[in-house]
């Protein structure tokens, strides 16, 4: 399964062009490609739809490797644990 970056580069799409098409910041695209950003379903849907529109191919989030979706339960418990460690 290809990554977002691999698909983007295969179709000669710049990060800026994809970000504009998806109506997200370029830094969001960069962090997603680096695996450093968890995104909401809404943002993932916007990026996948923009990628589909720009390339002319139909993509879904499950077609793209490395899209880290935000999980409120997992990410909330991680944030709470991190805060408790900082206090201690």
Image (cartoon, rainbow, N blue to C red):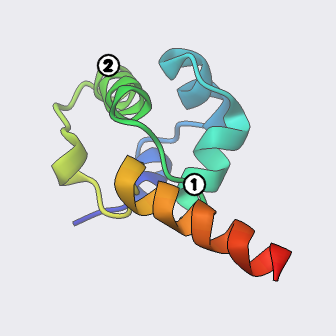
Can you tell which of label 2 and label 1 is closer to the viewer?
Answer: 1
x, y percent for residue 12: 51, 41
Residue 69 shows in the view: no
Residue position marked by numbered label 2 in the rendering = 53
User: Which element carries disc 2, helix, strand or loop?
Assistant: helix
In the current view of this chain or complex, which residue is farthest to the front? 88
- Above or below 25: residue 88: below
- Direction right: furthest residue: 87
| Residue 69 % position (x, y) | 37, 50
Residue 50 vertical placement versus 84 (above, below): above
**Residue depicted at 60% across the width and 18% down the height:** 20
In the figure, 18 relative to 6: above or below? above
- Label 2 CA crowd tier, 10 Å (few <14, some 14–19, many 20+): some
Q: Is residue 22 left or right of residue 28?
A: left
Distance from the alpha carbon under mark 2 to that under mark 1: 23 Å
Q: Residues within 10 Å of mark 1 (few under 14, many from 20)?
A: some
Tell me which residue sits at (17%, 51%) in the image: 62
Q: Are marks 2 and 1 in contact (CB under 8 Å)?
A: no
Tell me the quarter of the image containing the N terminus. bottom left
The answer to which image quadrant residue 46 occupies is top left
Label 1: state its secondary structure: loop
Residue linked to disc 1:
37
The residue sitting at 60% across, 72% down in the picture is 81
> What count of labels does the image hold?
2
Residue placed most toward the observer, 63 or 6: 63
């Amino acid at each position: 399964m290809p990554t977002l970056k691999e698909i983007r580069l295969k179709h000669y799409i710049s990060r800026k062009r994809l970000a504009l098409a998806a109506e997200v910041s370029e830094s969001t695209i960069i962090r997603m490609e680096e695996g450093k950003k968890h995104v909401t379903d809404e943002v993932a849907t916007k990026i996948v739809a923009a990628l589909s529109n720009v390339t002319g191919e139909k993509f879904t989030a499950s077609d793209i490797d490395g899209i880290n979706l935000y999980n409120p339960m997992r990410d909330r418990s991680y944030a709470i644990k991190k805060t408790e460690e900082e206090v201690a």
